Image (spheres, rainbow, N blue to C red):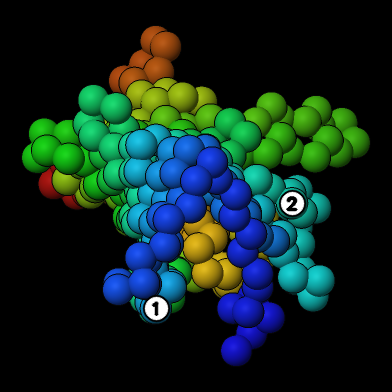
Amino acid sequence: GSTEAAATTNGTADRATYNGANQILTLTGSAHLDNENGSLLAPTVSLNQRTQDAEASGGVQATFQNTPSKTANLSPSAKPEAVTHILAASAHFDHATRFATFYGSDAVPARMWQDASQVQAATLLFDGIKRTFGPRPGKPEGLVHAIFASNASTPKPGVPARPPSMVRVASPKMDYNDLQCEATFSGGVTMDGTMGEVRGQHAVAFLTPAHAPGAKQPAPISPAQPSPLNGSIDRVVVYGAVQIDQPGRHGTGDQLLYTASSANYILTGTSASP
């Protein structure tokens, strides 16, 4: 296998108990696991020595490093070594499918953040093979909340630099694809921030990656997984019964395109509904 797959995971805890019948090692009391990709801290962590699956409970804190490969072509605004943090009530890691799930609730959601960007929902679902991320609410009326930040623009002669853009999103469903660097929101969406307040039926946020997608694969027991927070927001398209409100003006249309680098808006209608 790859060097990442063979990476060593180190662990410490106040107490370790091994059950030979089911081959489960249980670490209790400030259990701490770490390897080159990140670390995991929880009151209790159970490791299945046969399947390499893991369960963490009692309040989980995880961090992972997103270091691009040496051959990756980085943009000037790319962050070479970004650290992502996760807080959750519990977590499950499936080694064979490279699937990681962090659990919270609608009242106390699981939260993932990196610098000013963050995503929070009752459940955070990561698929390390398909390179997808799907936060979900716990109840039908629940929402996924996300904040995306863009880097400040580079100043040019006669053109001052633009400050970073910030977009806050609330939607019943979010799906992120690490290969396309796209975050899709459906079931109704509300956005606010630098672009004003926008409402529509669904939206797609296009991100500029800070690393080559899939350049580094997670090692066993590492929470390292695809994350929309690894990039900077490039543009957002909102579709269906779009409404936008900014100080002193209101707009409606069928589609809104917002470009973060220029802070430009294009609101489009139809012949029947201009």
Among all residues in the image, which is located at the extreme left?
140
Residue 225 numbered tag: none
Q: Label 1, label 2: how many angstroms apart (C-alpha)?
A: 33 Å
Q: Is residue 89 left or right of residue 138?
A: right
- Between 203 and 101, the one lying in front of the other is 101
- Give the percent coordinates (x, y) of residue 273: 16, 42
Q: Residue at x 65, y 45 (%)?
A: 83
- Between 49 and 34, the one lying in front of the other is 49
Among all residues in the image, which is located at the extreme right?
157
* Residue under label 1: 50
| Amino acid at the residue labelled 2 | Glu
Graded by Cα atoms within 10 Å as few (under 14), some (14 to 19) or many (20 or more), the crowding at tag 1 reads few
- Whether residues under marks 1 and 2 lie with C-beta atoms below 8 angstroms apart, the answer is no
- Give the percent coordinates (x, y) of residue 94: 36, 68
Q: Quadrant of the C terminus?
A: top left
Above or below, comparing residue 195 to residue 87 in the picture: above
- Give the percent coordinates (x, y) of residue 189: 25, 38
- Between 223 and 9, the one lying in front of the other is 9
| Amino acid at the residue labelled 1 | Arg
* Residue under label 2: 81
Q: Is residue 123 visible?
A: yes
Q: Residue at x 17, y 40 (%)?
A: 138
Q: In the image, which is nearer the foreground, mark 1 or mark 2?
A: 1
Q: Residue at x 50, y 56 (%)?
A: 223
Q: Is residue 266 left or right of residue 186?
A: right
Above or below, comparing residue 9 to residue 149 in the picture: below
- Give the percent coordinates (x, y) of residue 7: 65, 73
Tag 1 secondary structure:
loop
